[in-house]
Amino acid sequence: MLSTRRILLIGVMGLGMMWACDSTPDKPKTPDEAKAADGPKALEHQKCDASMGRMEKLDTDHDGKAELTQVFDKTTGRELCRIADLNHDGKADMYEYYNADGSLRRREGAYESTDAISEVQTFENGKLVHRERDTTGQRKIDTWDTYDPSTGKLIKRERDTTGTGKVDQWWSWEGDKITIAFDKNGDGKPDPNETIVVGANGQAITAPTANANTTSDGGVYIPPPPPPPPVLMQAYVAADGGAKKKPKNK
């Protein structure tokens, strides 16, 4: 006869096999679900320091603060990355990273008074294709931009205006028209009656039904795009890795 202990063990194993047979693999997450899976994501800074290779610094005004720091591979001598202080305050404003062929693959921008990264640009074949931004200073990504690599034009923007990591605005460009879709009910999808089309003059061509975006006089309130970062004069940084360029006098 089987012992009570063995009977219990067989029963537990049987239940485990039944569970395994009934279980189904998880569905792959959509891009929006992936963004919201663990809440808003922080912009990640990639390393660019002396541990990677030979470091060279350029201090043109001899104030002890390098305007340009470059890191080179010790074996091949090719440039791996560079750090630029564009406003001469001693803090890094921009990082650039290069492929083996010397083309630009990544650029990070630090637009605040801290070391926090505000923007990450991704390049393919030296062309900008994607950009992630923190437009609110919360140290989290809230805007995702997609560019046409053949023209360099912005073609799609996704925004998280609630700070949850979930996209609730979808912007798309077609010629002079911008279509903006909104998710007001929080289901992660564009609401059918919450889409507007904006013309070149900034006026709504197609307005949504009366809702929070409609003003009392029948007009349509169009949320502005994320504020652009401060204009940074790239006097010491060339995307092609060339020599320092002096700013033109105006």
Image (tube, rainbow, N blue to C red):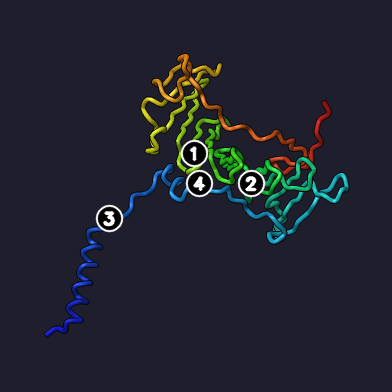
Rendering coords of residue 118 (x, y %) = 62, 43
- CA neighbours of label 4 inside 10 A, class few (<14), some (14 to 19), many (20+): many
Tell me which residue sits at (19%, 73%) in the image.
11
Q: Amino acid at mark 1?
A: Thr
Check residue 224 in the rendering and tell me which mark sits there, or answer none: none
Look at mark 4 in the image and give the residue it sits on.
Answer: 40
Q: Amino acid at mark 3?
A: Thr
Check residue 24 in the rendering and tell me which mark sits there, or answer none: 3
Distance from disc 4 to disc 2, alpha carbons, whole Å, reads: 15 Å
SS under mark 2: loop
Look at mark 2 in the image and give the residue it sits on.
Answer: 117
- Of labels 1 and 4, the one closer to you: 1
Name the residue furthest right: 62
Check contact, mark 1 vs mark 3: CB within 8 A: no
Distance from disc 2 to disc 1, alpha carbons, whole Å, reads: 20 Å
- Of labels 4 and 3, the one closer to you: 4
Distance from disc 1 to disc 4, alpha carbons, whole Å, reads: 10 Å
Which of the two discs, 1 and 4, labels the residue nearer the N terminus? Answer: 4
SS under mark 1: loop
- Of labels 2 and 1, the one closer to you: 1
Rendering coords of residue 154 (x, y %) = 55, 31
Q: Amino acid at mark 2?
A: Ile
Q: Is 4 drawn above or below residue 235 in the view shown?
A: below
Rendering coords of residue 238 (x, y %) = 72, 40
Check residue 162 in the rendering and tell me which mark sits there, or answer none: 1
Rendering coords of residue 75 (x, y %) = 70, 60
Which of the two discs, 4 and 2, labels the residue nearer the N terminus? Answer: 4
Q: Nearer the viewer, residue 110 or 54?
A: 110
Distance from disc 4 to disc 3, alpha carbons, whole Å, reads: 28 Å
Tell me if 108 is positioned left or right of 193 in this view. Answer: right
Tell me which residue sits at (44%, 23%) in the image.
196
Which of the two discs, 1 and 3, labels the residue nearer the N terminus? Answer: 3
